[in-house]
Amino acid sequence: MKKLGILKEFWSFLKVRKKWWLTPIVIVMVLLGALIFFTQGSAVAPFIYTLF
C-alpha cells in the first residue's frame, strides 16, 4: 500500500509542476531495473552484459 502512495505522489508532482519530461526517464529506469532483477543469476546474464 505504501508503494501505491509513492506512485500517487509522483503523479501529482508531475501534474502540478508540469515535469512531463521526467516520465520517459523514470519508465526507462524501471525497465532497466526489472531487466537486471529478472536476469540476475540466469543463463541470459552474460548476453546482457555484452549490450552495455
Image (cartoon, rainbow, N blue to C red):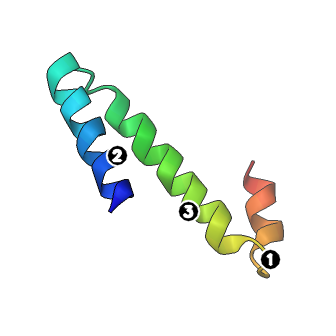
Kindly identify the residue that appears in the image at 19 percent across and 33 percent down: 12
Q: Mark 2: which amino acid?
A: Ile
Crowdedness near tag 2: few (<14), some (14–19) or many (≥20) residues, C-alpha within 10 Å: few
Q: In the figure, is residue 26 to the left or right of 6?
A: right
Place residue 23 in its image quadrant: top left
Mark 2 or mark 3, earlier in chain? 2
Disc 1: CA contacts within 10 A as few (<14), some (14-19) or many (>=20): few
Q: Residue at the location (59% across, 55% down)?
A: 33
Relative to 42, say whether 18 is above or below: above
Q: Which callout, 2 or 3, points to the residue nearer the camera? A: 2
Whole-Å distance between the Cαs marked 1 and 2? 29 Å
Left or right placement of residue 18 versus residue 2 in this view: left
Q: CA distance from mark 2 to mark 3?
A: 18 Å
- Which amino acid type is shown beneath numbered disc 1? Gly
The label on residue 41 is 1
The residue wearing badge 3 is 34
Tag 2 residue: 6
Pick the front one: 2 or 28: 2
